[in-house]
Structure formats: C-alpha cells, structure tokens
Amino acid sequence: MAEHDQTQGQWFVVQALSGQELKAADSLRRRCKQEGAEDFLFQVEVPMEKVSEVRHGKKTTQNRKFFPGYILVRLGLYEAPGKIDPRAWYFIKETQGLIGFIGGERPVPIDHSEVDAILNQARPGEEVAKPKIDFIIGETVTIKDGAFENFEGSVEAVEPTRGKLRLSVTIFGRSTPVEVEYWQVERG
C-alpha cells in the first residue's frame, strides 16, 4: 500500500481468526497490491506492544497484541452516507483469516483520534519492554533470584515503567523494604 493522506477513508475494526491477526493483515496488504485496491484500502494495523517475562530462568521479550482477534483497517467503505461500496465490503469479507466488520451490516467507523491514541500507545513499547505480569499492592510473592532468594514478601509499590517492585520482606523478625525487578519474583 502506498502512502496516503491520513484523512482518506475511515477506521474500522475487523475481526480476525484468533491467533491469525498478523497473517490476515499481511494477506490484506498483499491482496491490496495484487488487486489494485489502493483506491479504497489505505492502511492495515495490528496494534502490538513489547512485553518481557522470565521463562526457564531467562528474560525474554515478545510482542503482545493489544486486541487479540481484531485488526484496524483504514478504508473507504462508504461511497456516500449510508451506502456501502461493495468492492471494499467484499474485499474485507473475502480475505482469508478475516471474519468480518465489528458492527455487522452497518459498521460504524472509529474516531481518528482514538486510533491515533492506540497506535501511539503501541509504538513507545518498542523502546522499553513492559512486564507481562501486573502485580497488585498487598499481594504476596516469592523472590526467586538475587540476595533475598526464597524469601516471601508483600508488594508495597509497583513501578510498571521501570519493571520494579518494592516489597516488604521479613528478615530476622523485622520488616525490610526490598526493591526487585518483576522477573525476580513469582506469585506465591
């Protein structure tokens, strides 16, 4: 798909087969080039963020979809108010891996500002990987790495931007604050 004016078309949410969002988006892009659909299909996005987790003692980073089972598509679906362009409609409906528009027979477009917020939220995640697990204050966790390995602690503060926790750990009968990274603990 060539670069188009951001004001062309409207954004719609399209349901994809679960786990097939990236393949469906690639299929849409490929079909667009092959079948010359650039006049009504302008952009296809699968909003994602990077998350980190520890598996088998190693810290890994992977991509996670914001909306599993859905992709965002900017296209000219309506030729006139209330009149759907059959080419655009069937182009989406006939693409392998896609189920259809959210909203049924008369899909309602979502605001450009809402899509911008989603896409801008996804892009900074490329710079800093977010931890995959969300911790709750007061939750009990076990430290599995570092100087306090095998100690249990209560979560006092969560710093998702840094991927760190402040725990209250009892050492020699006294409560001691300890700062650890998300990957250094596991849920009790």
Image (spheres, rainbow, N blue to C red):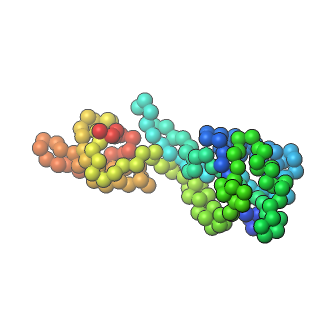
Seen at 76% across and 63% down, the residue is 9
> Would residue 2 appear left or right of 48 to someone viewing this image?
right
- Between 76 and 103, the residue placed more toward the observer is 103
- Between 89 and 63, the residue placed more toward the observer is 89
> Would residue 39 appear left or right of 146 to someone viewing this image?
right
Q: In which quarter of the image is the C terminus?
A: top left
Q: Position of residue 14 (x, y in %)?
A: 68, 52
Judged from this view, the residue extending furthest toward the left is 173
* Residue 72 visible, this angle: no
> Would residue 92 appear left or right of 72 to someone viewing this image?
right
Seen at 80% across and 61% down, the residue is 84
Quadrant housing residue 40: bottom right
> Would residue 133 appear left or right of 93 to someone viewing this image?
left
Figure check: 47 above or below 18: below
Q: Position of residue 156 (x, y in %)?
A: 27, 53
Judged from this view, the residue extending furthest toward the top is 56
- Between 95 and 153, the residue placed more toward the observer is 95
Seen at 83% across and 56% down, the residue is 86
Seen at 86% across and 45% down, the residue is 34
Q: Where is residue 45 in the image (x, y as percent from the top left)?
A: 67, 52
Quadrant housing residue 114: bottom right
Q: Where is residue 72 in the image (x, y as percent from the top left)?
A: 67, 54
* Residue 170 visible, this angle: yes
Judged from this view, the residue extending furthest toward the bottom is 81
